Image: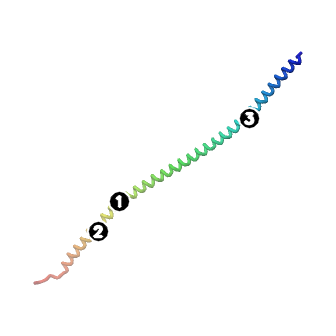
Amino acid sequence: MLTLEQLQFHKDKYAKLHSCVLATYKHEKQLLKEAKALNRDLLGEKIQVEKQAIRKAEEVAAFSSVEREKDRALKELAEGVDRDAVLAFEVTELQREYADLVAEKEAILAAHAQLIEPERVD
C-alpha cells in the first residue's frame, strides 16, 4: 500500500505529466494550424506559378505566331520588290521599243512624204 507521501508524489508526477501532455497537445494543435496555413499559402503559390506558366505559354505562342506573320510579310515584301524590279525593267524596255517604233514611224512617214511630193523641175 502507498503512503500518503508516496500518493502525493505520484499525484504530483501525474499532474506534471498531464500538464506536459496538455501542453504537447496544445503545441501540436498550434503546429498543425501553422502547417495548414503554410499548405494553403503553398497551394496559392502553386496556383500563381501555374497561372504564370500558362500566361508564358500563351505569350510564347503569340510571339511565335507574330514571328511567323512577320516572316511571311517579309517574304511577300521581297517578292513585291522583285516583281516591281521586273515590271520596272519591262516598262523601260517597252518605252525603248515605243521610242524605236515612233522613230521608225516618223522615218516611214518622211519617206512616204518624199514619194508623194512632186518632183521639181528646174
Closer to the chain start, of discs 3 and 2, is 3
Closer to the chain start, of discs 1 and 3, is 3
Total labels: the figure holds 3
Q: Label 1 is placed on what type of residue?
A: Ala
Residue 98 marker: 2
**Quadrant (top left, top right, bottom left, bottom right) of the N terminus:** top right
Which of the pair 72/34 is nearer the observer? 34
Return the residue at label 3: 30
Return the residue at label 1: 85
Q: List x then y, in percent, for residue 66.
A: 50, 52
**Quadrant (top left, top right, bottom left, bottom right) of the C terminus:** bottom left
Closer to the observer: label 1 or label 3?
3
Q: Is 11 left or right of 63, judged from the image as shown?
A: right
At horizontal 86% and vertical 21% (from top left) the residue drawn is 8
Q: List x then y, in percent, for residue 48.
A: 62, 44
Which of the pair 122/58 is nearer the observer? 58
The crowd level at tag 3 (other Cα within 10 Å; few <14, some 14-19, many 20+) is few
Give the quadrant of residue 20: top right
Q: Label 3 is placed on what type of residue?
A: Gln
Identify the residue at the far bottom of this view: 122
Cα distance between the residues tagged 3 and 2: 100 Å
Mark 3: which secondary structure? helix
Mark 2: which secondary structure? helix
Q: Is 118 left or right of 76, judged from the image as shown?
A: left
Give the quadrant of residue 93: bottom left
- Evaluate if marks 3 and 2 touch, with contact meaning CB atoms under 8 Å apart: no
Q: Label 2 is placed on what type of residue?
A: Tyr
At horizontal 45% and vertical 55% (from top left) the residue drawn is 73
Q: List x then y, in percent, for residue 71.
A: 45, 52
Cα distance between the residues tagged 1 and 3: 81 Å
Q: Is 80 left or right of 17, judged from the image as shown?
A: left
Q: List x then y, in percent, for residue 17.
A: 80, 25
